[in-house]
């Protein structure tokens, strides 16, 4: 009897908590992705890390500033903010900071770190305290391979009086997403042309995109970076070997300038080797950093850690190449909107952020039996990043013109509306195509991506001292495009011009009258759902912008010339 009564009281308490609390991310997918094995509840006293995304001020003003500093016709073009100026603009109100701090200290949470912009707070606390702060949450441990993670498989709430001060809490739900690079040597090798087939190497890239031996970086302060979120490492020795094999025809560096974060000893990863090797051979002789999140605490979100670093470093590379993406429908809108603001912050500082468009074409999601839709990827679908798609050579035996690589990610966001800079380009595409996939598969009013493209098929990569052929994916095209923009930044710095920053508004304006700055990719379609209505085909390339290869691939000398006049 007594026992029953206690249970009754507890359930009333639990119920009243839910009524008091609100969910910050009611639409966040909390399912455990396949491949992860449940190890059980964490101990009540286990230390976990939570990341509070505090509500920022002046987000509207920030948007106006980014739009102006990135618009070549604005008098504010290139007049970027320093990290301190950005901090004074967006940092949370005193009331927000105090409310959150009081809440945390009332629960005995003492160990917290903030960032320069004060809009993130990361705290170390015991699991039992975390579960009290976030009613509903239950922290469990999961394992995949050798990696363990702590996450909650049930949604978290937050007390109502806190909800207006916090956008979302990191370290509770999201599992790391994987952008897989594959070498087809291990997959469908047999279907590939063999013999004298041309693999992509730095000299092939440089020849195709019209880079001469003189097109290398020479400005001492120029820097570029790539970011790694997998438990992967690049090896300095692989980079050196790669340059010995493939870097003879141009001056380059063979050392990474700086590793930010943890870079542990371990087997080199294909993805990590690919990024570094192609960023440093396209953006040759430019100081290169690697942001590495390997070996992090098991309750952190690696992608979020990288964003925190951006907001905490005043001296930071100008160009960032990132091969990472997750399905839009698996993420909460609150999270995506806040991450989008983080990209605006980067744009306001004159940083260029490039994302791979993904390797599943238009993607596919089954919404109900026999009803499919395309599946956009985020951050590729953010209107404040430059998204890079993929191509292959039409004739795989010569450095000839490029066609769609059928894996190239692309389509339209269901979350972010089409930004002004691309309205005309998207409209032109939708109107000029004779056939388009059925309307029910995509949202024609959403942000269309990618913006640009580069080769993404049949790369040579050195990893663990072994040259590996047939490496493919938009994680190859992204560092190549990043290197190209770094070279242009280099030329700009020599002339005393500011960095290119968020480049989309300028690129779309440049291409209003199609120029020779891009090789327009007009042949081929990417993949999508395999069903009766679309039969595996998503969007097709066309003259001018399309949601498969954007404006096309770079013709370096022309692109450089077009981006040097202001
Ligand atoms: C940000 O940088 C400061 C000073 O360098 C450091 O004390 C702080 O811990 C950093 N914040 C995070 C979240 O790592
Ligand atoms: C660049 O390459 C293309 C094709 O390979 C070629 O037609 C063109 O003349 C080259 N040079 C310039 C400056 O565009
Ligand atoms: C490489 O870049 C450095 C500056 O970072 C410059 O001093 C050097 O001259 C460059 N190398 C060549 C061959 O131009
Ligand atoms: C290069 O960077 C250093 C340190 O950040 C700075 O003092 C110097 O003025 C910069 N030089 C140029 C030419 O921008
Ligand atoms: C289509 O996109 C717009 C914004 O671009 C959004 O408001 C709308 O909800 C989306 N529709 C669907 C079905 O997702």
Image: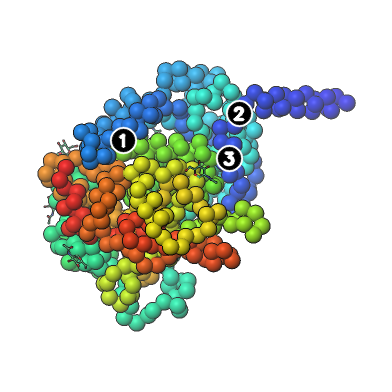
Instruction: Name the disc covering residue 370, or none.
Output: none
Residue drawn at point x = 32 percent, y = 70 percent: 393
The image shows residue 403, relative to residue 351, as above or below, that is: below
Residue drawn at point x = 48 percent, y = 54 percent: 178
Whether residue 113 appears in this view of the structure is no
Residue drawn at point x = 48 percent, y = 33 percent: 51
Q: Residues within 10 Å of mark 2 (few under 14, many from 20)?
A: some
* Image coords of residue 294 (percent x, y): 42, 48
Asked whether, in this view, residue 285 is left or right of residue 174, the answer is left
The residue carrying mark 1 is 66
Q: Identify the mark nearer the N-term, 1 or 2.
A: 2
- Number of numbered tags placed on the structure image: 3
Q: Disc 1 vs disc 2: Cβ atoms closer than 8 Å?
A: no
Q: Identify the mark nearer the N-term, 1 or 3.
A: 3
Q: Is the residue at mark 2 in contact range of ligand 5, meaning its CB lies under 8 Å from it? A: no
Asked whether, in this view, residue 422 is left or right of residue 72, the answer is right
Q: Residues within 10 Å of mark 3 (few under 14, many from 20)?
A: some
Cα separation, mark 1 vs mark 3, equals 29 Å
The residue carrying mark 2 is 22
Cα separation, mark 1 vs mark 2, equals 32 Å
Q: Mark 1 or mark 3, which is nearer to you?
A: 1
The residue carrying mark 3 is 27
Which corner quadrant of the image does residue 158 belong to? top right
* Disc 1 element: helix
* Image coords of residue 388 (percent x, y): 35, 54
Residue drawn at point x = 34 percent, y = 82 percent: 195
């Amino acid at each position: 009897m007594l026992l029953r009564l206690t249970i009754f009281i507890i359930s009333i308490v639990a119920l009243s908590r839910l009524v008091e609390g609100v969910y910050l991310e009611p639409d966040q997918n909390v399912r455990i992705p396949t491949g992860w094995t449940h190890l059980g509840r964490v101990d009540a006293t286990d230390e976990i890390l939570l990341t509070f995304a505090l509500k920022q001020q002046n987000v509207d003003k920030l948007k106006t500033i980014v739009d102006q500093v990135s618009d070549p016709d604005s008098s504010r073009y290139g007049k970027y903010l320093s990290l301190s100026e950005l901090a004074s603009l967006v940092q949370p109100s005193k009331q927000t900071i105090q409310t959150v701090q009081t809440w945390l200290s009332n629960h005995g949470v003492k160990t917290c770190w903030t960032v320069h912009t004060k809009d993130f707070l990361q705290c170390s606390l015991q699991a039992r305290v975390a579960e009290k702060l976030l009613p509903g949450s239950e922290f469990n441990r999961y394992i995949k391979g050798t990696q363990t993670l702590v996450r909650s498989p049930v949604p978290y709430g937050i007390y109502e009086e806190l909800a207006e001060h916090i956008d979302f809490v990191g370290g509770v739900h999201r599992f790391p997403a994987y952008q897989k690079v594959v070498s087809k040597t291990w997959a469908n090798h047999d279907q590939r042309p063999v013999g004298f087939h041309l693999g992509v190497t730095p000299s092939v890239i440089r020849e195709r995109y019209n880079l001469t031996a003189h097109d290398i970086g020479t400005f001492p302060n120029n820097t570029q970076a790539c970011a790694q979120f997998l438990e992967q490492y690049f090896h300095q020795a692989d980079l050196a070997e790669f340059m010995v094999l493939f870097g003879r025809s141009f001056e380059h560096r063979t050392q990474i300038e700086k590793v930010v974060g943890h870079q542990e000893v371990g087997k080199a990863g294909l993805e990590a080797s690919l990024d570094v090797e192609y960023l440093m051979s396209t953006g040759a002789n430019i100081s290169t950093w690697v942001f590495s999140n390997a070996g992090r605490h098991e309750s952190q979100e690696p992608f979020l850690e990288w964003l925190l670093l951006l907001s905490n470093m005043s001296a930071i590379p100008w160009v960032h190449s990132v091969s990472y993406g997750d399905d839009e429908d698996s993420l909460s809108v609150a999270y995506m909107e806040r991450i989008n603001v983080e990209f605006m912050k980067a744009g306001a500082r004159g940083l260029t952020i490039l994302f791979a468009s993904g390797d599943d074409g238009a993607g596919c999601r089954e919404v109900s039996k026999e009803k499919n839709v395309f599946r956009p990827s985020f951050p590729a679908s953010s209107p404040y990043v430059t998204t890079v798609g993929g191509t292959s050579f039409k004739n795989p035996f010569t450095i000839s013109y490029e066609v769609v690589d059928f894996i190239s990610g692309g389509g339209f966001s269901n979350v972010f509306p089409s930004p002004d800079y691309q309205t005309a380009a998207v409209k032109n595409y939708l109107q000029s195509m004779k056939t388009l996939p059925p309307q029910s598969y995509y949202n024609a009013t959403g942000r269309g991506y990618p913006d640009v493209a580069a080769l993404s098929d049949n790369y040579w990569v050195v990893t663990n001292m072994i040259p590996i052929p047939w490496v493919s994916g938009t994680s190859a095209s992204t560092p190549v495009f990043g290197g190209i923009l770094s070279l242009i930044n280099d030329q700009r710095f020599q002339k005393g011009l500011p960095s290119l920053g968020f480049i989309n508004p300028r690129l779309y304006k440049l291409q209003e009258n199609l120029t020779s700055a891009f090789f327009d990719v007009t042949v081929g379609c990417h993949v999508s759902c395999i069903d009766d209505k679309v039969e595996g085909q998503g969007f097709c390339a066309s003259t001018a912008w399309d949601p498969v290869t954007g404006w096309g691939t770079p013709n370096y000398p022309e692109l450089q010339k077009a981006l040097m006049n202001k």
